């Protein structure tokens, strides 16, 4: 059996955000484990060479343009050379490949990271909603199985799309620890760290309002927003006293910020997984997180939770965690223990088991 994985979002020329970084880790782990799979070969389709994947397992599909590699080049490959199994870990599926689906040759599998556009449609443009709804319709119609990273996302799919529960496979993401001893006495700066896209969808407006309330009693504390800024989000109109915008950052810079910050905050109204929480656990940061099902599922009892619709509650949670060293120590220890539950080899094993059926 030949299993093909769309690795197009793993090329080095892409500025990667959460889902792309998660996809990279998943693909790396699958590649490391493929030797244990008998009578099966895994091929990674990509528009250019990926240095960290075995060359003999890459099929480079050349395309002279910056756009439409998936919708045209990949689609044509799937139509004229259909594999037995095709797996999409992050990217949208090509529309043209419905031709190969009609031929009943290929079994398709896809990851759906979240369906926030269904639950918060006002935060998405017409174009975004059209593309995301179309991709979701294709997944519902074509895919043999759909992988989701949390039980919360699985329930969202059942509630909002009527996809049969038996078609949805819950597979939690893993995590590779970057530190050896996160529970230590590091002299941290008086700064609160947010990692992720800086946009309306991530509830940055309420985060800033909550920080402004908090900073009245803590004028020496700084909020750092580390992530790509959506040009449509008028963040400069909100007042940015004691707030630092870093835009897109490298992994090295992110690790530096995690080492020196006092608290990580993630108060999105919708998330698919909440990967920054695991990074905070790894680096020994206490976390203030949104009181929403998906982040409760990831954080358990290792986070302090705040209502995302209430800047006042966000401010109260920041105050509580900054002023209580005993609480900080409890959360850091609980986070270190909880991190052990997230294991990439187990994740890859479960996905490979489904792809191999």
Image (cartoon, rainbow, N blue to C red):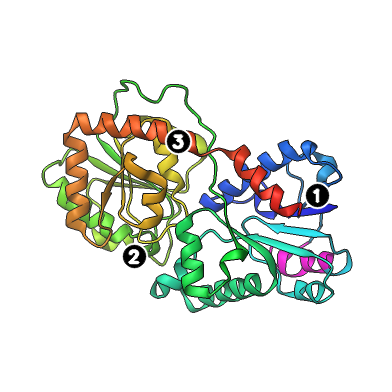
Q: Are marks 2 and 3 in contact (CB under 8 Å)?
A: no
* Residue located beneath label 3 in the image: 339
- Magenta stretch prevailing secondary structure: helix
Up-down: is 15 above or below 100? above
Q: Which of the 4 image quadrants contains residue 280?
A: top left
Of residue 58 and residue 313, the one placed in the foreground of this image is: 313
Dot 3 alpha-carbon crowd within 10 angstroms: few under 14, some 14 to 19, many 20 or more: many
Q: Is residue 228 left or right of residue 308?
A: right
Question: Cα distance, mark 2 to mark 1?
Answer: 43 Å
How far apart marks 2 and 3 lie (CA) works out to 35 Å
Residue at x 34% of width, y 29% of height: 333
What residue did someone put label 1 on? 43
Q: Quadrant of the C terminus?
A: bottom right
Is 204 placed above or below 278 here?
A: below
Residue 39 x/y as whole percent: 87, 45
The mark that comes first in sequence, 2 or 3, is 2
Task: Decide if residue 135 is in sight here.
Answer: yes
Magenta run includes residue 69: yes
User: Residue at coordinates 82% horizontally, 40% vertically from top-left?
Assistant: 55
Q: Residue at x 34, y 57 (%)?
A: 292
Q: Is residue 299 magenta?
A: no
Judge by depth and name the residue closer to the eye, 283 or 14: 283
Side of 62 where 275 appears, left or right = left
Residue that numbered label 2 is attached to: 234
In three-dimensional space, the C-alpha distance between marks 1 and 3, rounded to whole angstroms, equals 31 Å
Nearer to us: label 2 or label 1? 1
Q: Which residues are magenta?
A: 64-78
Tell me where residue 63 appears, x and y as whole percent: 79, 61
């Amino acid at each position: 059996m030949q299993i093909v994985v769309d690795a197009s979002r793993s090329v080095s020329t892409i500025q990667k955000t959460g889902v792309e970084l998660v996809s990279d880790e998943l693909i790396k782990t699958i590649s490391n484990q493929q030797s244990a799979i008998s009578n099966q070969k895994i091929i990674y389709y990509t528009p250019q060479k990926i240095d960290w994947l075995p060359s003999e397992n890459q099929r480079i599909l050349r395309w002279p343009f910056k756009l439409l590699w998936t919708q045209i080049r990949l689609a044509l490959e799937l139509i004229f050379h259909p594999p037995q199994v095709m797996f999409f870990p992050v990217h949208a599926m090509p529309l043209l490949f419905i031709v190969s689906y009609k031929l009943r040759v290929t079994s398709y599998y896809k990851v759906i990271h979240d369906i926030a556009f269904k639950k918060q449609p006002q935060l998405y443009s017409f174009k975004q909603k059209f593309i995301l709804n179309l991709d979701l319709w294709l997944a519902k119609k074509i895919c043999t199985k759909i992988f989701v990273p949390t039980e919360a996302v699985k329930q969202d799919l059942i509630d909002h799309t009527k996809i049969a529960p038996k078609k949805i496979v819950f597979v939690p993401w893993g995590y590779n620890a970057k530190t050896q001893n996160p529970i230590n006495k590091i002299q941290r700066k008086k700064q609160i760290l947010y990692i992720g896209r800086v946009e309306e969808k991530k509830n940055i407006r309420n985060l800033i309002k909550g920080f402004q309330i908090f900073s009245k009693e803590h004028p020496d504390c700084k909020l750092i927003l580390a992530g790509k800024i959506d040009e449509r989000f008028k963040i400069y109109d909100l007042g940015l006293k004691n707030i630092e915008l870093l835009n897109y950052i490298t992994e090295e810079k992110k690790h530096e910020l995690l080492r020196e910050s006092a608290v990580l905050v993630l108060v999105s109204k919708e998330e698919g997984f909440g990967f920054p929480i695991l990074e905070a656990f790894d680096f020994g940061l206490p976390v203030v997180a949104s009181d929403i099902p998906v982040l409760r599922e990831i954080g358990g009892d290792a986070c302090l939770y705040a209502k995302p619709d209430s800047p006042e509650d966000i401010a109260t949670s920041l105050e509580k965690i900054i002023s209580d060293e005993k609480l900080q120590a409890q959360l850091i220890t609980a986070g270190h223990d909880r991190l052990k539950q997230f294991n990439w080899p187990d994740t890859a094993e479960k996905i490979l088991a489904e792809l191999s059926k």
